Image: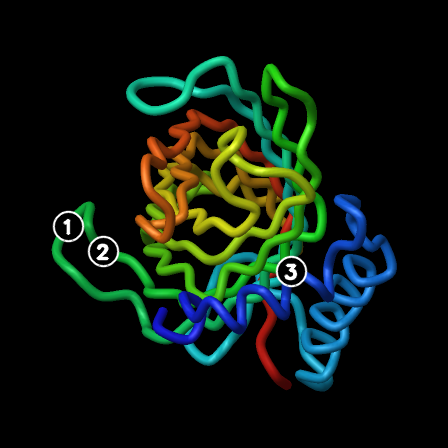
């Protein structure tokens, strides 16, 4: 996280993504396209109904929620992104805790933060997500997820504070298998703040519901 907290790098990336207080849409499109290209570069693969060691997960997702608990209130968040994950282990662990470990990254080219002062547009990149896929014999497979990354916005978030923030959170949810694809539904706690880079940043805590459509793959 040292790299992402560098003020010079943050300023450079912000200039790349925004101009005149508005998101550069082509940049957001490029970020999304690069993520898609990276997934395609994995080569020929076959779809799997469940995660398998050495395989991968591709998922498109969207989520929405509202501020809750401590922090700044009266704020709504909507975002959408693409996830690419690597299944690192076989099923392991005792009893109902048995599952497979997955590491993933998210490209988030669409972020809308609804504040009383107006809407902030943003793009984000989450370089790490740690996910535990519980091993079940049925179509419904619960999971636990924790991760975070960096968020750039067209106006200050919270209002009057910073255009560069970190977005981290944890989630519980479930994959519901349907043939070679799976739907996911989760409840996520999302925290947005600049980690103390500016004075007096109370942060925003959001309870979010996220839905996704994904595919587990492995190389032939």
The percent coordinates of residue 77 (x first, y second) are 58, 29
Q: Residue at x 42, y 25 (%)?
A: 207
Q: Is disc 1 in contact with disc 3, using a CB cutoff of under 8 Å?
A: no
Q: Residue furthest right?
A: 26
Q: CA distance from mark 1 to mark 2?
A: 6 Å
Please state which of the two labelled residues, at mark 3 or mark 2, is closer to the viewer.
Answer: 3
Residue at x 78% of width, y 49% of height: 23
Colouring mode (rainbow / by chain / secondary structure / one colour)? rainbow
> Which image quarter: residue 92?
bottom left
**Whether residue 101 is situated above or below residue 141 in the rendered picture:** below
Q: Nearer the viewer, residue 9 or 30?
A: 9
The secondary structure type at the circle numbered 2 is loop
Given this view, does label 1 or label 3 mark the residue nearer the observer? Answer: 3
Task: Give residue 145's mark.
Answer: none
Residue at 57 percent of width and 38 percent of height: 156
Q: Quadrant of residue 89?
A: bottom left
Label annotation for residue 95:
1
Give the Cα distance between marks 1 and 3.
Answer: 47 Å
- Per the image, the residue denoted by label 3 is 14
Q: Identify which residue, 33 or 76, lies in the foreground.
A: 76
The numbered disc on residue 98 is: 2
Please, what secondary structure does the residue beneath circle 1 have?
Answer: helix
């Amino acid at each position: 996280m040292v790299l992402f907290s560098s003020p010079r790098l943050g300023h450079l990336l912000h200039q790349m993504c925004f101009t005149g207080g508005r998101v550069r849409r082509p940049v957001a499109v490029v970020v999304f396209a690069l993520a898609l290209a990276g997934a395609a570069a994995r080569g020929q693969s076959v779809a799997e109904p469940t995660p398998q060691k050495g395989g991968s997960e591709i998922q498109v997702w969207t989520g929405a929620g509202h501020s809750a608990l401590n922090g700044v209130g009266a704020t709504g968040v909507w975002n959408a992104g693409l996830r690419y994950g690597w299944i690192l282990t076989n099923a392991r662990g005792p009893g109902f805790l048995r599952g497979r470990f997955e590491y993933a990254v998210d490209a988030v080219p669409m972020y809308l933060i609804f504040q009383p002062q107006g809407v902030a547009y943003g793009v984000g990149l989450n370089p790490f997500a740690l996910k535990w896929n519980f091993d079940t014999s049925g179509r419904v497979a619960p999971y636990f997820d924790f991760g975070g990354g960096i968020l750039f916005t067209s106006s200050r978030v919270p209002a009057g504070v910073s255009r560069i923030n970190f977005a981290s959170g944890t989630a519980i949810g479930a994959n519901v298998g349907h043939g070679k694809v799976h739907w996911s539904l989760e409840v996520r706690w999302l925290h947005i703040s600049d980690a103390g880079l500016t004075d007096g940043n109370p942060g925003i805590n959001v309870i979010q519901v996220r839905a996704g459509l994904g595919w587990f793959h492995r190389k032939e």
